Amino acid sequence: MDWRSVSIGLIILVVILAGAVGYLAIGGARGGAQPQVVTSVVTSQVTVAQTVYQTVTATVTSTVQGGQQLRSLKVFFFDPAPANPWWDIVVEGVEKAVSDLKILGVNVEYTRFDATTLDKQISQLQQALVLKPDLAVVGTISDAVQDLVKQLRQAGVIVVLVDRDLPDQTSRDLYLGTDNMVAAKVEAEAFLAWLSSKGVSKPWKIVIFKGLPGIPTSYLRYQGFIDALKPYISRGDVQIVEEVEVNPDLLNEVYQKASSIIPKYGKSVTAYMATNLLQALGIVKALQDNNIQPGRDVYVLGFDAQLPDWVSMIAQGYVAISIQQHPFTMGYWAVWTGYYMKTGLLRLPEKAVINTPTYKVFTCNATYSLYLDHFAIHPTEIVSLASRLTPQQPQIQAPGYYSFPC
């Protein structure tokens, strides 16, 4: 099956749908139409691919009524990892929203601040306090910037954090990003069900690469894995034989660590679970260099699906499953949040959290996942989701709008 052809066919369908609804959104906003949700389900054979019988669902909202006219918007984006492929997609989302607003006639003054060190980001945030943008979209390098971020909000700047939240949730207006614990639990549960469906003999022996203490995303994903494993451990179906601490962002260090562990267990381990894709990449390489075939002799679970080499490993079956986040949506919705808040269309409770979509990635939909990174979910969906937040329930999970389930 040519999944690249399948994916291109699906993209054409989804883009046509999104474009049509986007046209209605702009026209409806001018004409004052009421909000409505449009859902398209493709269940029959798709001509352009000739191989698609699965269901693809795209849900978008056509328009939102009301709001004051906004002529200008000053947007600052703080990028904590310039040239990082994952963060490059966040940038793409931010800049697509800026472009869309300009097309709608909004005079957007956009500035991007790149920082690779804490000191540099602190300096940039201090500069923002003087310049006072309308909106600050912040990817934090460290919790150490929390006080400055809070000062920005107190100065009247709309503050949206992307990917990484801060301990004091009152320091920002909104957090847009993945619920890492929930996503990891969902992924691990799907992986365990997959092992069971394949009839892999029990007890399953698991090695977990958990990152380093003090890295919140790694810790939360590790906790999600453990939550999924607990029932299996209590029944004697799973044994965690080792937990490995390693810097999850240094591929060579991960590879060296994996290379020292893999010979100890050989093929007796059922699976290696990793809290990010670089750890999983290092594990796959170390397994291959030890003449152990990932996907046949031992199984690998990772996290994220942004790098082509990594997605290729999933497509080839070397990696059993991964979870795809949606960094484009984090950036795209963050800018639109600022716009809608300035126009009065969007109001948020304190400590508001909107968890962006996640998708399970298997061999059968791995190629499609690369294209999924660049789909723009209609911005009025952020208003729809925010309208369901309350002071008692300030958090909501966005659905998988462009899902392609296997």
Image (tube, rainbow, N blue to C red):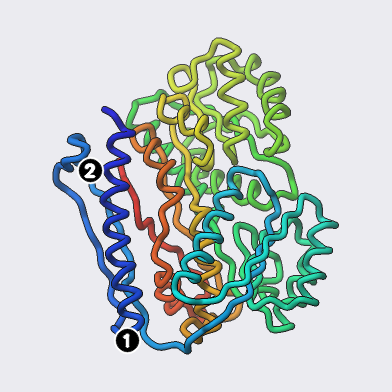
From the viewer's perspective, tell me whether residue 117 is left or right of residue 73.
right
Q: Which callout, 2 or 1, points to the residue nearer the camera?
A: 1
Mark 2 lies on a secondary structure that is loop
Residue type pointed to by label 1: Gly
Where 241 falls versus 118 (above or below)?
A: above
Q: Quadrant of residue 125?
A: bottom right
- Residue 391 seen in this snapshot: no
Q: In which quadrant is the C terminus drawn?
A: top left
Q: Name the residue under label 1.
A: 32
Residue type pointed to by label 2: Gln
From the viewer's perspective, tell me whether residue 97 is left or right of residue 275.
left
The picture places residue 7, in percent across and down from the top left corner, at 32, 40
Residue drawn at point x = 44 percent, y = 22 percent: 295
The picture places residue 266, in percent across and down from the top left corner, at 58, 14
Front residue of 293/306: it is 306
Residue drawn at point x = 51 percent, y = 76 percent: 106
Say which mark, if any, is on residue 54: 2
